[in-house]
Every structure is written in structure tokens, then in C-alpha cells.
Image: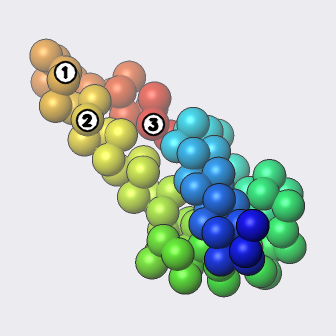
């Protein structure tokens, strides 16, 4: 596998991990460890592939999950939903 493909696989793996663990707010160290890179190389590579830093991407995911919960909520009072996304 060429390096370009391996980078893509690592970033895709990190994005899946973030999506599945968004409420836990994984650290940069945890994400880098998960894909087998140093945190500096991972941060640079993630930004290159995703167009956002890992933290920005996590914030984006959190907002999107909150919007989805609000869309499907029948209650005006959505505090439990807000807490559910962190």
C-alpha cells in the first residue's frame, strides 16, 4: 500500500473513532495513538485530509449530533439531548 493510501486509511479510522466517541471528547494523544502516529504528524495529516483540525472536527460533529437530536425531539425542553452530545 502506498503512503497516500495509508494516510487516507488512518484519517478515515480517526474520523470513525471520533464519530463513535464524540461525547467522550477524545484527546489528540488518544486519537494519534489510535491510528499509530505521533500527535504532531497526526494533527498535520488530519488537517490536510479533513480541512479542519481534530478539535474543529469534533466541535462540528458535536453540533451536528445536537442538531439531529433537536430535529427529532418533540419537546421544547431539550436539556437531556444537549447533555447527550457533550
Q: Quadrant of residue 36?
A: bottom right
Q: Position of residue 53 (x, y in %)?
A: 55, 74
Q: CA distance from mark 3 to mark 2?
A: 10 Å
Q: Quadrant of residue 21?
A: top right
- Residue 73: which disc? 1
Q: Position of residue 50 (x, y in %)?
A: 48, 71
Name the residue located 57 percent from the left edge and 36 percent from the top edge. Answer: 20
For label 1, the crowd category at 10 Å Cα-Cα, with few meaning under 14, some 14 to 19 and many 20 or more, is few
- Residue 41: which disc? none
Q: Is residue 20 left or right of residue 10?
A: left
Up/down of 9 relative to 79, above or below = below
Name the residue located 45 percent from the left edge and 29 percent from the top edge. Answer: 84
Question: Do the residues under discs 1 and 3 have CB atoms within 8 angstroms?
Answer: no
- Name the N-terminal-most of marks 2 and 1: 2
Foreground residue among 40 and 9 = 9
- Name the N-terminal-most of marks 1 and 3: 1
Question: Do the residues under discs 2 and 1 have CB atoms within 8 angstroms?
Answer: no
Pointer 2 residue: 68
- Secondary structure at numbered mark 3: loop
Pointer 3 residue: 85
Up/down of 48 relative to 34, above or below = below
For residue 68, say whether it is visible. Answer: yes
Question: Do the residues under discs 3 and 2 have CB atoms within 8 angstroms?
Answer: no
For residue 25, say whether it is visible. Answer: no
Question: Can you tell which of label 3 and label 2 is closer to the viewer?
Answer: 2
Amino acid at each position: 500500500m502506498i503512503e497516500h493510501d495509508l494516510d487516507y486509511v488512518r484519517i478515515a479510522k480517526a474520523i470513525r473513532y471520533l464519530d463513535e466517541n464524540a461525547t467522550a471528547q477524545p484527546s489528540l494523544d488518544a486519537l494519534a495513538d489510535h491510528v499509530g502516529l505521533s500527535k504532531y504528524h497526526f494533527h498535520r495529516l488530519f488537517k490536510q485530509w479533513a480541512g479542519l483540525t481534530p478539535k474543529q472536527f469534533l466541535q462540528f460533529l458535536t453540533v451536528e449530533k445536537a442538531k439531529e437530536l433537536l430535529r427529532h425531539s418533540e419537546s421544547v425542553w431539550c436539556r437531556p439531548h444537549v447533555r447527550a452530545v457533550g
